[in-house]
Image (tube, helix red, strand yellow):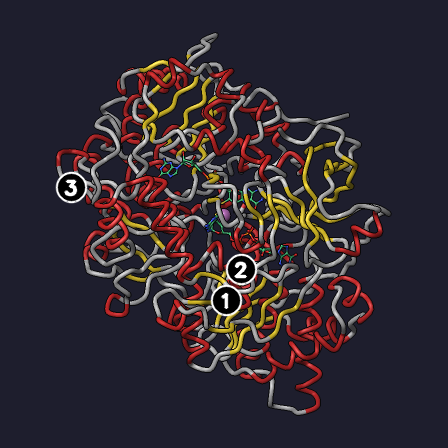
Amino acid sequence: MSVSPIHPPVDAEESELRVTERKTSAAGAKAVAVSMKRSLAEQGVVKTARNLLTLNQVDGFDCMSCAWPDPEPGERHTAEFCENGAKAVAWEGDRRQVTPEFFARHSIEDLRTRSAHWLESQGRLLHPMVRRDGGTHYEPISWESAFELIGEHLRALDSPDQANFYTSGRASNEAAFAYQLFARAFGTNNLPDCSNMCHESTGVGLSQSIGIGKGSVSLRDLHEAELIVISGQNPGTNHPRMLSALELAKKNGARILAINPLPEAGLLKFDNPQHARGMTGIGTRLADEFLQIRSGGDLALWQAFGHLLLAAEERNPGSVLDRDFVERHTNGFEDYAAHVKDLDRDAVVAATGLDWEQIEKAAAMLVSSERTVNCWAMGITQHRNAVNTIREMVNVSLLQGMIGKPGAGLCPVRGHSNVQGDRTMGIWEQMPDQFLDRIRDEFGFDPPREHGNDSIATVKAMAAGHGKVFVGLGGNFSQAMSDTGVTEPALEQCALTVQISTKLNRSHVVAGTDALILPALGRTEKDLTGGRAQQVTVEDSMSAVHASHGRSQPAGELLRSEVDIVCNIARATLGADHVVPWAEFTTDYDRIRDRIGRVVPGCEAYTEKVARSGGFTLPHPPRDSREFPTTSGKAEFAVSPLTVTTLPEGRLVLQSLRSHDQFNTTVYGLDDRYRGIHSGRRVVFISPADLRELGYADGDRVNLVSEWTDGTVRRADDFRLVSYSTPKGCIAAYYPETNPLVALDSYADESRCPTSKWIEVRLEPATRAPVA
Ligand SMILES: Nc1nc2c(c(=O)[nH]1)N[C@H]1C(S)=C(S)[C@@H](COP(=O)(O)OP(=O)(O)OC[C@H]3O[C@@H](n4cnc5c(=O)[nH]c(N)nc54)[C@H](O)[C@@H]3O)O[C@H]1N2
Ligand SMILES: Nc1nc2c(c(=O)[nH]1)N[C@H]1C(S)=C(S)[C@@H](COP(=O)(O)OP(=O)(O)OC[C@H]3O[C@@H](n4cnc5c(=O)[nH]c(N)nc54)[C@H](O)[C@@H]3O)O[C@H]1N2
Ligand SMILES: [Mo]
């Protein structure tokens, strides 16, 4: 049986696809030039200067391109932004406008034939729009009628659990807190979010191992580290400001170990545009060792590291392990030690594709380091065995006591700028009872206790017909989720879809019977809700919470803040005399912050603390005092089986990743400069050895075919093969084009994160004519 999506159309410009040499360093003067050019084109000179200079400054707005922390207030550069942050700001400051006339010109059927890049390039959404049952076009609607329509649909449901409230990670803490409060007051914990597809495996793995799902380092720890390990992350593109921290760490004597199937430019060398050296292209060499690991080999590698650390300790007792830490703060050491002592080296070599000598050399870096910071991102979390892999990395940190000491720790690098804060505020389908009790005590209603739907369960519920209302607070669910061929029709099955958005995307055109587009203010824009200048707050990847206020003139007069939209949906659904003072929340966001302070653990006196310059850092017991809030009160070693997955003949493992010119499903442009791709996205990076063995040549066009265990077949057609440095058997292509290949049931054990980095495929010659 074939599961095929409605084919999102391919960009016409893709016919110009060109491939050049890949780059071996990131950033530099070129990066600044690229961002300034784009920003000037989209926003004009004055707005560009104002926005870029207030980006990530104490009295400015928080950059929405990633969750990397800001340096201490006194240590910030005048220009504390990166090329991709500037792109994100320019994208939001777009002067082009999507007006009601635009929707009158373009039917929904027409919009379905447009590429993602085209849709996002039409400009900012300006007016609330509705498509009613049977309508061919979106039409303007007043805010009040839009809220009423949502209220009517929600009140008509047989059960509150027939609604799903999705959140993308850009929502502020205030919007997120109000949104989860509304969902729970309405009566459901169905709060799927982008974290379900992102760092969910981190949350689950860290909670099991150390009792809290967040990283344990501050920016200072990175600066002071002796060794920084970077696994499954491409910081040059996705967290460019991290490169400045790495550069400083190197200056202070740190070494860097990079573990990745691809030799990503930003891992190898950094030309810092903030320094004269960087502008001249001399730059800082970053990785001292690079392990070009096979996809999914990380669990085996970290088990080997554990094995080698224990062996080194045996040879030289007292020199490697932090015995005192292990004894006082951990559980399960003996079982773990016995398990990794008995390591199957051949299995490690097969799983990682690395030589044993290389692994020994890398382990020696760990052995000799007193202060190690361990960073990771999607290359680790989006695998079947991701939770075990993360716990395996933690095992090694525990051996050496690398938690709760300066210059050391665990550093999962988050994606969306406020994805961590949204979770802190209660955007999670499984919030603990303690949190729900505090809501009950504060507001006087009892929130539902039964766990709600995550992203996968949401798609299943909609496909089965019991998920009838979908609300998206930001994001682009139809493209971000796995299994496009299932997810798109599932959304279309809904009685009502509501997308709270800044720009047009595919989720607006695969819509429910009734469909609403509600245009929101972005983070760069002045928020005058309730007639006063409002600020919001966010939390970065290292648990630092601070204020953010936009300075630009909003793109349109009708735009409303996310807080305003959420509170008005709540009021229209639950009534004006509800126990939660929704109207008061929109007059002054301090009234929401007061409640956050009383409900959210660690946020006591929130309103006062975020009013201080620089904000505050949330408590993290393992980092702060080596206390581990697990059931046993200690950090837990984990014992995980080492399995080697062998693929049938002719099958390859595909990882789906980001190009340099995109933010998740937002395609800014069609280049991936560092990897040498120009004017095109339908490419597959493949090793020369696989090309030879499978009888293809660089430049050939292929279709990707994935066969799931239940016999269903998924395809994505017409990609150009690009000969590239990647381990044999491991290929790569961009997301979201490859999401049609990921079966909905292909997800990580325990965390249910889609396996976006492990998609088993075969190639077949493209039958379709190349894109013209
Ligand atoms: N400019 C820009 N910034 C962004 C984003 C964006 O799209 N654009 N997205 C934001 C979001 S939401 C997120 S979550 C982050 C994502 O940041 P990243 O995690 O850096 O994003 P990906 O492009 O998915 O890159 C995954 C990396 O893991 C490697 N990898 C793949 N499989 C494996 C494996 O099995 N083992 C190892 N060791 N490595 C592997 C890939 O080669 C690649 O280098 O970035 C955030 N920042
Ligand atoms: N195959 C594959 N799939 C993946 C991944 C992968 O690596 N491979 N990565 C996964 C990851 S890590 C993530 S985080 C998800 C991302 O999933 P999402 O967060 O759902 O997707 P985005 O592309 O970030 O959402 C873009 C849309 O958000 C809206 N938007 C932007 N800014 C704002 C704002 O300030 N307010 C509001 N209300 N709306 C705004 C715009 O309309 C824009 O079109 O995708 C996941 N999907
Ligand atoms: Mo993410």
**Label 2–label 1 contact, CB within 8 A:** yes
Q: Secondary structure at mark 1?
A: strand
In front: 379, or 166? 379
Residue matched to label 2:
206
- Label 3: which residue? 533
The disc, 2 or 3, on the residue closer to the chain's N-terminal end is 2
> Is residue 654 found left or right of 677 in the rendered image?
right
Q: Which-is-in-front pick, marks 2 and 3?
A: 3
**Residue matched to label 1:** 410
In percent of the image, x 37 and y 15: which residue is there?
152
Residue 380, position as x, y percentages in the image = 60, 56
Q: Does 367 sit above or below residue 205?
A: below
Q: CA distance from mark 3 to mark 1?
A: 38 Å
Q: Amino acid at mark 3?
A: Ala
Q: Nearer the viewer, residue 503 or 50?
A: 50
Separation (CA) of disc 2 from disc 3: 39 Å
Label 2 crowding class (10 Å Cα cut-off): few <14, some 14-19, many 20+? many
Mark nearer the N terminus (3 vs 1):
1
The answer to whether residue 748 shows anywhere in this view is no
Specify the quadrant that holds the C terminus. Answer: top right
The amino acid type found where label 1 is placed reads Leu
Depth check: 441 or 667 in front? 667
Q: Residues within 10 Å of mark 3 (few under 14, many from 20)?
A: some
